[in-house]
Image: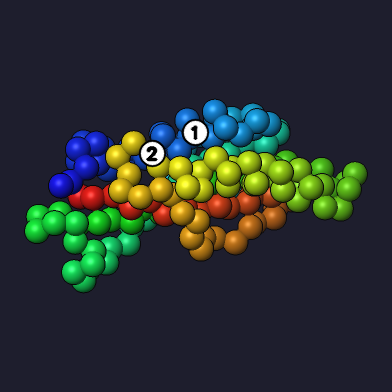
Amino acid sequence: MANAVLLLDYLFAGSLIQARLREQVAGLEAVDGLESLAQASEAHVTSARAFVIWTGDTFDTGESGRASRASQIVRQAWTVLLAVRNASQVQGDARNASAGPLLSAAHRALAGWSPEGALRPLIRINGPRPNYQASVGLYPLTFALDLVI
């Protein structure tokens, strides 16, 4: 049977992931949604922030990807992009030093968590590589969420 919430809002999980991060990860200035990874580079980061981005779907088109005769399992990928301001003039690996504990907290908050409407708990999957720019470091954690449509 298809997920009723998914049929009303295909990207409903984004707001649930944002809320979970706000509740579970101390030390973030803000948690917001974005439409692309490029937007995070343009955001003004004064202290640690997280962005949640839907990064697409995958479908198993074989029999194992069917939930029933009329429904299918969709695996949505969601990337949490932690943005940390550059302070390297003080310490060469300052961004990594401040990002590490926040990345661990974000992973703990989401890995194994089942948002309402999920078929299975979130799992970590491969995602984009970190991106270090002059003013900000961008650290991605990507999760898969299985839903029935």
The structure residue drawn at horizontal position 47% and vertical position 47%, both measured from the top left corner, is 112
Which residue is the site of mark 1?
20
Give percent across and percent down for residue 30. Answer: 59, 30
The structure residue drawn at horizontal position 79% and vertical position 47%, both measured from the top left corner, is 97
From this view, report whether residue 136 is shown above or below residue 29.
Answer: below
Amino acid on which the number 2 mark rests in the picture: Pro
Q: Nearer the viewer, residue 3 or 133?
A: 3
* Residue 78 visible in the shown view: no
Q: Which comes before the other along the chain, label 2 or label 1?
A: 1
From this view, report whether residue 86 is shown above or below residue 76.
Answer: above
* Residue 131 visible in the shown view: yes
Give percent across and percent down for residue 142. Answer: 50, 54
Q: Nearer the viewer, residue 145 or 83?
A: 145
The structure residue drawn at horizontal position 34% and vertical position 36%, both measured from the top left corner, is 116
Amino acid on which the number 1 mark rests in the picture: Arg
Q: Quadrant of residue 46?
A: top right
Q: How is the image coloured?
A: rainbow
* Mark 2 touches mark 1? (CB < 8 Å): yes
